[in-house]
Amino acid sequence: MAKYDLHVLPVVDERGALVGMVGIDEVIDALTKETTKEVQRLGAVEPLDVPYFQTSFAAFLRKRGVWLVILFVEEFFTQTALRFYDPIFEAIKGASYYVPLLISTGGNSGAQSSTLVIRGLAVGELRPRDWWKILYREAGMGVSLGIGLGAIGFGRVLMYRDQHVDFALTVALTLVGIVTTGCTVGSMLPLVLRRFGVDPATSSTPFIASLVDVLGIIVFVHVAKVVMASVIAAHGGPVPP
Amino acid sequence: MAKYDLHVLPVVDERGALVGMVGIDEVIDALTKETTKEVQRLGAVEPLDVPYFQTSFAAFLRKRGVWLVILFVEEFFTQTALRFYDPIFEAIKGASYYVPLLISTGGNSGAQSSTLVIRGLAVGELRPRDWWKILYREAGMGVSLGIGLGAIGFGRVLMYRDQHVDFALTVALTLVGIVTTGCTVGSMLPLVLRRFGVDPATSSTPFIASLVDVLGIIVFVHVAKVVMASVIAAHGGPVPP
């Protein structure tokens, strides 16, 4: 109806006989409801079906609680990863304090990419078979945005007198890696979900962010192991893989 | 038009004379475009105006970069806060590894609340003057969801043999405090922005999450200072306020 500027659509049975009609006013109502569901899913809330104040407290607890628990379990892997890499964080004093900053920057870039792709799919601007064009663009975007943020991060870390150039470089390179990870995972996950028949909006912004958080820790540790190899070696002890 | 099921609206000048009309097909197009802008703002992307592949790489860098930089600067305060509370994290071995988990749970609950309020305002289900009813409901929701997640967190921490009950209790109580903070801040910030004439969707999901991240660290440290006072005292050294 949007394409041909129609106000009414006929409904026909299998023989082509008219059995009813759909007015554009009904379409607008349905569109608004669908959009609300999409927005709520993006915000990690199970769609409410009824307005805010008409939703019972128990229904709210269920529709929000289920997602908070899923995200909590997902996010617990950040603690598992940090614990696993404990020797690295012990060797690099203060490094663990940069973790929330670094991983949430990856999460933010992932949230942007997933939002663009999910909305693009919803309005038909993007098609799943263009995935490689999207991947190509998002990877380029991730590297470019990562270099920009890395430069800011490099300067900011060096403003602390007790931080060295090698740690500033670790933060900068981690940002490039993390933002690239965020953009590629954030853009591809909705397409993968769609491929398996799941509503892409199910991969809500927080879901992508938590996933990228865990990947971000792995990127950070591996950049540090290369750039700060001498510091880690000087501290001694076993180094996790 | 949605309210009275109209298909055409007359446009009149100040004397009431007909000067034109607006068809519902134009309204649907405008509605879809506005929704796309709203969704993109929620995902921390400046609205694109044109479809994904028609947006130039430079325009993308600008529209995404500006938000990533704002969020990066905002999120840098997590590092500042963690550094400030260094003596507490030094005293409680492994506590800093729980920071991403705890603060992002607050961010997730905040994202849910802000999504519900922003969408509610957009479709007219919620009115700014009902703020106290929203605050009342969100605070109750925060405490309830926080207790649920706190119980899960308490059990999960105790699954580690090297963690004690007092640390598990710290995690549980922090979750109650953080989720309540997330729900109240996440629901009120869009209303405050609206009050000052700013589009509520500007307080994107990642913006709320980063804000709640910083508040979450403060909640965590203060709960730890009460529950684990003896551990912190035994470690010695100055305790930040």
Image (spheres, coloured by chain):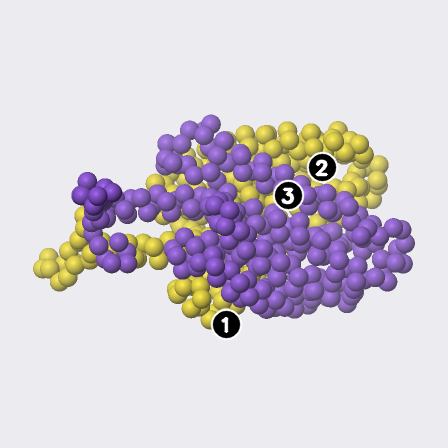
Chain colours: A purple, B yellow
Marking on residue B224: 2
Instruction: Tell me the quadrant of the picture where the C terminus of chain B can be found.
Output: top right
Q: Which chain letter goes with mark 3?
A: A
Q: Secondary structure at mark 1?
A: helix
Q: Could you say which is closer to the camera, residue A164 or residue B197? A: A164
Q: Nearer the viewer, mark 2 or mark 1?
A: 1
State left or right for residue A13 relative to residue B116. left
Residue A44 x, y percent position in the rendering = 50, 42
Q: Between marks 1 and 3, how big is the CA–CA gap?
A: 34 Å
> Looking at the rendering, which quadrant does residue A141 occupy?
bottom right
For badge 1, the amino acid type reads: Ala
Residue A56 x, y percent position in the rendering = 42, 29
Marking on residue A151: none
Residue A114 x, y percent position in the rendering = 51, 54
Do the numbered discs 2 and 3 sit on residues whose CB atoms are within 8 Å?
no
Q: Nearer the viewer, mark 2 or mark 3?
A: 3
Q: Between marks 2 and 1, how big is the CA–CA gap?
A: 46 Å
Marking on residue A75: 3
> How many C-alpha atoms fall within 10 Å of the one at disc 2: few (<14), some, or many (≥20)?
many
For badge 3, the amino acid type reads: Glu
Q: Secondary structure at mark 2?
A: helix
State left or right for residue A89 relative to residue B187. right
Seen at 69% across and 61% down, the residue is A174
Seen at 72% across and 37% down, the residue is B225
- In the image, residue A39 above or below residue A172: above
Seen at 64% across and 29% down, the residue is B151
Q: Which chain letter goes with mark 2?
A: B
For residue B116, say whether it is visible.
yes
Mark 1, residue position: B58
Report the number of numbered marks.
3
Of pointers 2 and 1, the one earlier in the residue sequence: 1
